Image (cartoon, rainbow, N blue to C red):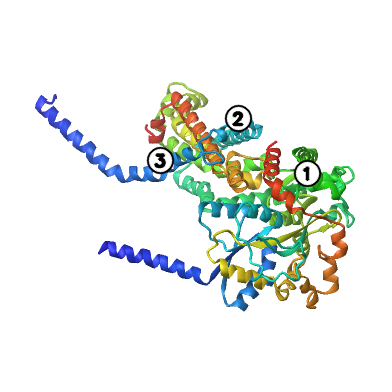
Amino acid sequence: MQATPANASGLRVDEKLERMKLFGLSSPALLLVLVILVIPVGWLFYVSFLGGNGQFSLENYQRMVERSSYMRIFRTTFEVSLVTTGLCILIGYPLAYFLSQIPPRIANLCMITVLLPFWTSLLVRTYAWLVLLQKQGLINEWAMALGLWDEPIKMVHNMTGTLIGMVHIMLPFLILPVYGSMKAVDRDYVKAAANLGASPRRAFWDVFFPLTMPGLFAGTLMVFILCLGFFVTPAVLGGGKVIMVSMKIVSNIELFVSWGAASALGVVLLALTFAILWVASRFLKLDQIAGGGH
Amino acid sequence: MKHKMTFTLVSALFATTAMAHADDLTVASWGGSYQEAQSKALFEPAAKAMGIDVKQETYGGMSDVKLQVSTGQVTLDIVASGSGSAARAGAEGMLEELDYDVIDVSNFGPTLYSKYCVGGDVFSTTYAWNTDTYGENGPQSWADFWDVEKFPGKRAYRNKVAGALEPALMADGVAPEDVYKVLDSEEGIERALNKIRELRPNIDVFWSSGAQQAQLMKDGEVDMTTGWNGRFDNAKKDGAKVAYSYNQALLDYDCFAIPKGAPNKDLAMKFLAEISKPEYQDDLPKYITYGPTNNLAFETGVIDAATAAGLPSSPENAAKQLPISLEWYAKWETVASEMYQEMMTE
């Protein structure tokens, strides 16, 4: 069935009209994005080029290159984010798989426990870890009472504590998208693979796993990017020794009231985040992930 | 019609904020057991006597004041500050000059008030130790604090530069009276930082607040920490196994300042005059072991001889300590702070 030329041009006009209508509908949202995102980020960008005397200057960026502390802080930030993301995948993927395989009623119950941490404040959860992990905290006391170890193990005020706290907070951000994409996988595919002679392991890796990739990538990216800007957890559980970019931004403002230096850090972190997204987009279709397209 | 309503709403909003400010004073301090003591001894009784409402906040120090002043959004009328930071903030034009015709300082020690800040209490930055680990006779000098062979165990140290370099130099063998001479150059500051780097493997936590010092000692998370003497006494009252010494401690005072452009400057000045009176100051040691800055407070009979002898400012205790140099902080704090933060990331 082919449309006649007259029909086709009519359709085109309709399409145009519809597009304009849609644009009109989305304009409040676009305006909001402009006001609360584009303008402040632009301002941030502008301020980062202001020197101590209020004149245009590159000193804020120069300082980052000259001082070795900035390099160390960025390295720590990426280290913490990478390891946290890795641990979240190792713990989250199997858990999501388990949740997707059990009967929905039990799965829903388990899902509530996964989401439970979202209902309490991040600060409270972080301090709770402090109580659990410190030298005379619950975990050390119980383990020593049970004879698991004799001397208290140092689990907080260092990298270990920071990672434990961050993985706990980030885990739901990985589990949710992964679980979503696992539920969307048609079980018949795996059955068909088995029917064609694939072992359960092969069916999982060759059929099921690739189909859950969009969810896994979405979760991974989300966790990693959220980690880059983390402040409270490393500040409390790191004991002043795990210093991430966000903490340096705070100290630039709190100690030196240097908006330019703080903004420059923000700009560099933003640029690095975009760079990561760009690299990621070379390997996979980001829009598909965002839209969860199956 | 619609416009009119919005206008009324907005003006009503302005009216209420203006009203709220009319007889309100906002005072910011450091929180924890320290602010509780100030509140009970100074703020609440003085507010009652003057018939005003005083709103209390906690804040992060002069940096908050600088933020407010530099953005023109000053909400604090009075801030409690370390004397050194106040000296620097005053020099940078962040504070109102105090009117000593209103505030009577005729019975203050001569070093306990300045152009921008009037002393509120005298305290010590010192070292405290866990009495379960070391007994009552723990470290007696900064050299002992650094001596991890004689006193094995984990330390906590400050995450900011104030009061952090002087101990390091004394541990490095510099006589207390020479500390500020040595620190009067970047090399001297670097020498102090190197001494901290030396102790760093044994520093488990860099603390950020007085409440955290007390908590670390209460929980036995570290065996030794630097900190403020009053916090340790209060932690001890709460059952912490903690003791401290005044030997080589840093004698310092906290003061009250008015941020530049404070919304209720005149009332703030009157309030400072009120809380500087001996009848309020003599109650402070009941709640925290910090000494009064007004000498008349010792003569009201409220502070007994035993309490007075235990205060940082008692002649016997003061003689063992190094008084903080405000000139040094005004001149070097920014530079030293940057070098200190650099060291922290290593």
Q: Residue at x 71, y 69 (%)?
A: B105
C-beta proximity under 8 Å, tags 3 and 2: no
Which quadrant: the C terminus of chain A? top left
Tell me the tag on residue B183.
1
Amino acid type at circle 3 is Val
Question: Which residue is denoted by mark 2 in the rendering?
Answer: A65
Front in this rendered view, residue A198 or A90: A90
> Which chain is disc 2 placed on?
A
What is the x, y in percent for residue B9?
35, 65
What is the x, y in percent for residue A100?
47, 39
Q: Earlier in the sequence, mark 3 or mark 2?
A: 3
Q: Quadrant of residue B7?
A: bottom left
Within 10 Å of the Cα at label 3, are there few (<14), some (14-19), or many (20+) other Cα atoms? few
Is residue A281 toward the left or the right of residue B116 in the image? left
Within 10 Å of the Cα at label 1, are there few (<14), some (14-19), or many (20+) other Cα atoms? many
What is the x, y in percent for residue A96?
50, 38
Residue A194 in sight here: no
Q: Which residue lies furthest to the front in this view?
A: B101
Question: Which residue is denoted by mark 3 in the rendering?
Answer: A38
Amino acid type at circle 1 is Leu
Amino acid type at circle 2 is Val
The image shows residue B253, relative to residue A223, as above or below, that is below
Front in this rendered view, residue B171 or B220: B171
> Which chain is disc 3 placed on?
A
